């Protein structure tokens, strides 16, 4: 057996040894790929990672369909985080492109803070959550119309 053949055989066997770990992951993701429980992908696929806000608002509790959707997403996030007590999260507050940089940074921070406060109110330890504001600097949707702006007025939860 040549050294190259031995190396390829060892690599093949090492790959087979990793298969049971992969089989233990959930298949509940998009595209049929495995989603690791407790991962960012799990949060996105099974819980939801973002809530949305009205123009110039940072309240989660106003009446209407969007507010109920936000509460449902945040309640699922709180439950998910209770299942994965080792996970910490960062909440990023975002805005659409309108308004000054300073105004949007402050509004994004209020959005991140209200989201954090909701999760802490549901029992999440405060030290598991950090916040940041990106203002209008990191849009998730490109465009300068109401559809894009609505998608960019959000708070996004990321596993750290």
Image (cartoon, grey):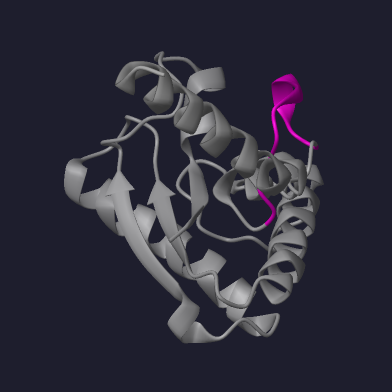
Q: Is residue 157 above or below residue 2?
A: below
- The picture places residue 21, in percent across and down from the top left corner, at 67, 48
Q: Is residue 125 above or below residue 82?
A: below
Report the front residue among 86 and 64: 86
Question: Is residue 30 shown in magenta?
Answer: yes
Quadrant position of the C terminus in the picture: bottom left
At 37% across and 30% down in the image, what residue appears? 139
Magenta range is 28-37
Report the front residue among 160 and 74: 160
The rendered magenta stretch, by its main secondary structure, is classed as loop
Report the front residue among 144 and 118: 118
Q: Is residue 29 above or below residue 42?
A: above
* Residue 23 seen from this side: yes
Q: Is residue 153 left or right of residue 52?
A: left
Question: Is residue 74 shown in magenta?
Answer: no
At 54% across and 30% down in the image, what residue appears? 151
| Outermost residue, front side | 1
């Amino acid at each position: 057996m040549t050294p190259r053949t031995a190396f390829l055989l060892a690599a093949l066997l090492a790959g087979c040894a990793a298969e049971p770990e992969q089989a233990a992951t959930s298949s509940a993701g998009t595209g049929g790929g495995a989603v690791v429980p407790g991962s960012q992908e799990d949060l996105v696929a099974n819980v939801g990672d973002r809530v949305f806000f009205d123009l110039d608002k940072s309240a989660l509790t106003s009446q209407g369909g969007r507010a109920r959707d936000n509460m449902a997403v945040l309640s699922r996030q709180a439950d998910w985080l209770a299942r994965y007590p080792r996970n910490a999260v960062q909440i990023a507050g975002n805005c659409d492109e309108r308004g000054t940089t300073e105004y949007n940074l402050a509004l994004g921070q209020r959005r991140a803070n209200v989201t954090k406060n909701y999760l802490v109110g549901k029992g999440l330890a405060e030290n598991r959550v950090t916040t940041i504001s990106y203002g209008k600097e990191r849009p998730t949707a490109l465009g300068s119309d109401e559809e894009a702006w609505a998608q960019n007025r959000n708070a996004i939860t990321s596993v750290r």
